[in-house]
């Protein structure tokens, strides 16, 4: 389930959403490229067959979104994602990880380093297109089978969480919102639960992300589980 509001245009972008596809299988790259290029609001700038090439292409093309396969030769998608996300590209490139596995420690690690979400490669075509739009708009997205179950299993194998002192900077309402974000709820769903407007929820989410120094909602989910909120 996407943890986001309805997708909008890429942040700060008035033209088409630009995309790079990184996957070691040529047929996957070609198929995804044809699918995305057929959309009037999307433009494919290039592709890559391994992690090193993915970093090079993204630094050169500066796409809004890179679809990044987890397992690739030379350097994998996690390495490539971290290089891209720490390169301070302007405008920033957001990473949407692709995998054939719905339960994988790589998911947790990808979200920890700042990927905007995960999607299974066998997702329907319309779901892939929507995922690109969601991530380009600055939101986060997790495939339905990769939500709470995965993060619970992974964090359960780590040491007992220690409450981060930065939590004390949150207001009680922001703590409530963080708890609901960690449940994978959209802004509209959170607003309905708390009897406030969707815009009010967006304000709370923006505030708590700033206070906790988190990149986006995906990292907020990981933070919540790491710190024993969920």
Image (cartoon, rainbow, N blue to C red):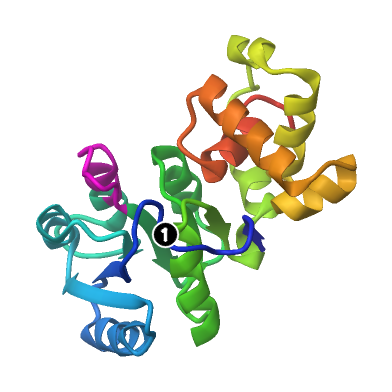
Q: Residue 141: x and y, percent?
A: 55, 58
Indicate whether residue 85 is drawn in magenta.
yes
The region drawn magenta spans 81-93
- Magenta span: predominant SS is loop
Residue 71 vs 127, above or below: the answer is above
Q: Residue 116: x and y, percent?
A: 45, 51
Residue under the image location 42 percent in, 59 percent down:
136
* Of 52 and 105, the residue lying toward us: 52
Using the rendered view, name the quadrant where residue 27 is placed.
bottom left
Indicate whether residue 167 is drawn in magenta.
no
Density class for disc 1 (Cα within 10 Å; few <14, some 14-19, many ≥20) is many
Q: Residue 152: x and y, percent?
A: 68, 44
Quarter of the figure with the N terminus: bottom right
Residue 114 vs 3, above or below: the answer is above
Left or right relative to 223: residue 180? right
Quarter of the figure with the C terminus: top right
Looking at the rendered structure, the secondary structure element under dot 1 is helix
* Of 202 and 229, the residue lying toward us: 202
Using the rendered view, name the quadrant where residue 85 is placed.
top left
Residue under the image location 65 percent in, 41 percent down:
202
Residue under the image location 73 percent in, 27 percent down:
174
Residue under the image location 27 percent in, 76 percent down:
43
- The answer to whether residue 197 is visible is yes
* Of 224 and 152, the residue lying toward us: 224
Q: Which residue is mark 1?
A: 136
Residue 153 vs 170, above or below: the answer is below
Q: Residue 50: x and y, percent?
A: 17, 65
């Amino acid at each position: 389930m996407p943890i986001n509001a309805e997708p909008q245009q890429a942040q700060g972008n008035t033209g088409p959403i630009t995309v790079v596809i990184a996957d070691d299988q040529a047929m996957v790259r070609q198929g995804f490229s044809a699918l995305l290029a057929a959309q009037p609001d999307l433009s494919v700038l290039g592709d890559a067959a391994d992690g090193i090439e993915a970093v090079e292409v993204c630094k050169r093309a500066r796409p809004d979104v890179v679809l990044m396969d987890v397992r690739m030769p030379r350097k994998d998608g996690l390495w490539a994602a971290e290089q891209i996300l720490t390169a301070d590209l302007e405008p920033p490139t957001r990473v949407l990880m692709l995998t054939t596995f719905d339960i994988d420690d790589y998911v947790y690690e990808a979200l920890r380093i700042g990927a905007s979400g995960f999607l299974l490669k066998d997702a329907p075509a319309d779901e892939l297109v929507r995922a690109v739009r969601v991530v380009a708009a600055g939101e986060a997205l997790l495939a339905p089978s990769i939500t709470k179950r995965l993060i619970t299993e992974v964090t359960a194998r780590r040491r007992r969480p220690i409450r981060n002192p930065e939590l004390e900077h949150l207001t009680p309402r922001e703590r409530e919102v963080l708890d609901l974000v960690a449940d994978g709820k959209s802004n509209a769903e959170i607003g309905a639960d708390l009897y406030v407007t969707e815009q009010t929820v967006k304000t709370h989410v923006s505030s708590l992300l700033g206070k906790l120094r988190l990149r986006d909602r995906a990292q907020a989910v990981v933070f919540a589980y790491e710190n024993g909120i969920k």
